[in-house]
Amino acid sequence: EDQVTQSPEALRLQEGESSSLNCSYTVSGLRGLFWYRQDPGKGPEFLFTLYSAGEEKEKERLKATLTKKESFLHITAPKPEDSATYLCAVQAGNTDKLIFGTGTRLQVFP
Amino acid sequence: DAGVIQSPRHEVTEMGQEVTLRCKPISGHDYLFWYRQTMMRGLELLIYFNNNVPIDDSGMPEDRFSAKMPNASFSTLKIQPSEPRDSAVYFCASSANTEAFFGQGTRLTVV
């Protein structure tokens, strides 16, 4: 069964303190791995898509990487406005649906 | 494009009543997904459509839930009769077979 596990569940950082969020997956034939950001009371907002091991994508203070078993979302010198829940999702090769992890709730304090 | 539009944003209803949630996907997207989000279970896929045809409804919890997509620009998710355990945020998302774009969700409370 396709499965996505995110860790940690929650992360508290001081402003400027870099860290990484983990997304481990088990899927039959990965078509794509997706990262989303969700703010309270809003829908998930698309960040990145990764398709193959070794691929990296960057956007401002965020960098996503992918291996054959997991993905990392690296946050460099975070700011309070980076506080949100970060969701990871996978799309298997034999289906079009996205399977989501339960997310990492990030809080960045000034 | 205004993005995925869902209505209503909030719905409070009494147990046993029928509830209808509505979604307008992004123009040109041929996939539409209905998700439910709770604190306990996170985002769960209920059903998805491709070119207005239901492809996978294995996530629909029971027969009280039904979804339709009469045309490319409109979909509904209906719960009849509603129960308190249906309380959650329901999201609609659309895609062109790559990343999915989500609406703002409908927060449903069944009392």
Image (cartoon, coloured by chain):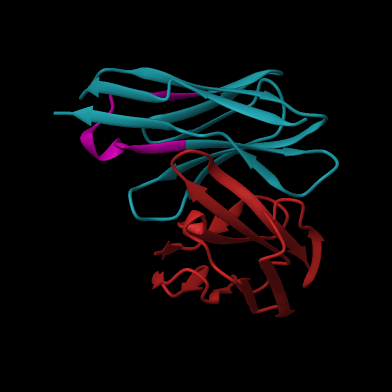
> Looking at this rendering, what residue extends furthest in the right direction?
A94
| Residue at point 54%, 67% (across, down) | B82
Name which residue lies at 60% across and 47% down: B44
In the picture as drawn, the residue positioned furthest to the front comes out as B16
Is residue A92 visible from the viewing direction of this image? yes
Q: Nearer the viewer, residue B58 or B81?
A: B81
User: In the rendered structure, which segment of residues is drawn in magenta?
Assistant: A73-86
Residue B24 in the figure: left or right of residue B55: left
- Please state the horizontal and vertical placement of residue A54, each as a whole percent of the image: 66, 20
Chain red in the figure, letter = B
Q: Residue at x 52, y 59 (%)?
A: B91
Q: Which quarter of the rendered picture does the C terminus of chain B lie within?
A: bottom left
Q: Is A9 positioned to the left or the right of A53 in the image? A: left
- Residue B10: quadrant of the picture: bottom left
Establish if B23 lies above or below B83. Answer: below
Residue A97: x percent and y percent?
72, 48
Q: Residue A5, percent across and down?
A: 58, 25
**Chain with cyan colouring:** A
Nearer the observer, A104 or B38: B38
In the picture provided, is A72 more to the left or to the right than A20?
Answer: right
